[in-house]
Image (cartoon, rainbow, N blue to C red):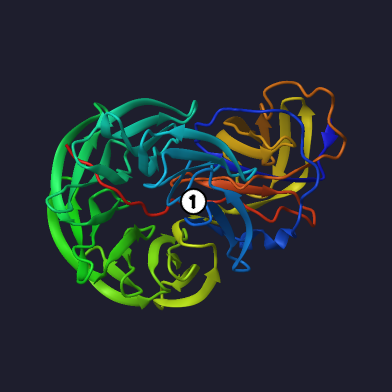
Amino acid sequence: MFSINRLKTIVSHNTKNSLRSSLRLTSALVLCALAGIAQAAPFTYVLNRYDNNVSVVDLASNSIVSSMPAGMITPTEIAIDSDGSRAYLSSTWSTVVSVLDLKKGSLLHTISLGNSGADVALSASGDTAYAGMTSSSGPAIAVIDTATNQITRTIAISAINSSAIALHPDGSRLYSLEMRDTPNTGTVAVIDLASHTVVDCLAVGIESTDIKVSPAGTFAYVVNRDSMQANGSITVIDTRTNTVDATIPVGLRPSGLSFNPTGSQAYVTNSGDNTVSVIDTTSHAVVGLITAGNGPKHVAFNPSGSRAYVTNQLGNTMSIIDTATQRVTASVPVGRDPWGIAFVGEATGPIVNITMAPAINSPNQAQYGIAGTCTPGAVDVRIELTDGSLSIGPLTSTCSPTGQWTLSNLWPMALSPSPPSKPTVRALPALRRPPLPSILLTAPTTVATSREMYKRYPLAAFGQVCS
């Protein structure tokens, strides 16, 4: 048995991830005091179309802390997998989907889409990606197995292209925004993902650019430019009946939209007049107008909905909006021609302090004494290893009368050779989707990692599809 003087793990209940990876424990990189854990900095990922890269903005300092290659030309769309380890990028101007390793900041794989790509979306489990594409066989939706990064099937569509797609929260349907040539008429194809067939098709506006489904899944919003010289609109689709429910006038040349986490409001970027329309989703009416930067393109929210982040295509900046006051509080320089944006946020689970030094009782068992209620059951422990891989549960948690947790099967095999007597383990920025609760365990020392569990909200997308 050996003790671990410094350790942080992230524990999430009821996850389905399997154990993976090697056994070499990382050393060092424990950066900030325990008192600073709750204020761990969130980030935004910004896609810079002319630089062909991704800027990582630390929102504690409002500055770029790193960048990574996009692995493609003119990146515009992004989706993140369920454990936050990979990002999937696409663009109408590119022929591939790029798969990025977010831990290493490097290109992992490219998936060919034929003649051109479009938008990309991921299933809730992260097992399947969907991408708009055009090949020699015509426009289609590619279905991608993310374990192999291979296209397993395509779903044919009958429009000019598919430029934006959105998944229903329950994973049963895909909504694909298509462009028709009569002239530039937008339509939405409703695709049943069990049969991989188009089951409905709805007419929306002119020059439609984006589609999003509300967090509750009861309605979808479609952005329509309608005209380059006149104000655009939002088409409201009732997803329960697949009917158009309302039309909402917005600003000049609207581009992207995003719902806040509760779904009570939607923000629409108006690139023609440098504003953001704030829509109340109960009344489906504009209740605010915010002046943004030059050419606002896409928008993302933090988990609480207190901040919105807008990319400004012509200003090469990212605006930070206080949603309570509906005012821009900061403008952050990013790369050239920024489009897509994704938020990476703080842990929202409670912080539980460890009351005794954790110990490894055997090659596959660790013990923790914690302050608080010990809950038996399956838990998910995430720790970073020296090779950059991630060890993930679920593990079995049992409780002693004193409240000490025992987490079994921490590693899938015996440690060989034995690790040093005082290794340091740090948790990776990990992605968690609600409603999974989490408990953050931190050793009672003066150190902890500077980056906590992150929750990522995919950026806006644009596209078109129908049958």
Left or right: 200, with 84 as reference point = left
Residue drawn at 23 percent across, 62 percent down: 225
Splitting the image into 4 quarters, where does residue 377 fall? top right
Residue position marked by numbered label 1 in the rendering: 456
Q: Nearer the viewer, residue 443 or 177?
A: 177
Extreme residue toward the right, this view: 421
Residue 279 image point, x, y percent: 27, 67
Splitting the image into 4 quarters, where does residue 399 fall? top right
Left or right: 434, with 13 as reference point = left
The answer to whether residue 140 is above or below residue 222 is above
Quarter of the figure with the N terminus: top right
The answer to whether residue 135 is above or below residue 44 is above
Q: Amino acid at mark 1?
A: Arg
Q: Is residue 423 in sight in this rendering?
A: yes
Residue 406 image point, x, y percent: 68, 33
Residue drawn at 69 percent across, 41 percent down: 402
Residue drawn at 27 percent across, 67 percent down: 253
Q: Give the number of callouts.
A: 1
Residue drawn at 65 percent across, 43 percent down: 104
Residue 113 image point, x, y percent: 39, 34
The residue tagged with tag 1: helix, strand or loop? strand
The answer to whether residue 346 is above or below residue 415 is below
Q: Residues within 10 Å of mark 1 (few under 14, many from 20)?
A: many
Left or right: 348, with 263 as reference point = right
Quarter of the figure with the C terminus: top left
Q: Nearer the viewer, residue 371 or 100?
A: 100
Q: Is residue 376 in sight in this rendering?
A: no
Residue 223 image point, x, y percent: 25, 59
Splitting the image into 4 quarters, where does residue 208 fall? bottom left
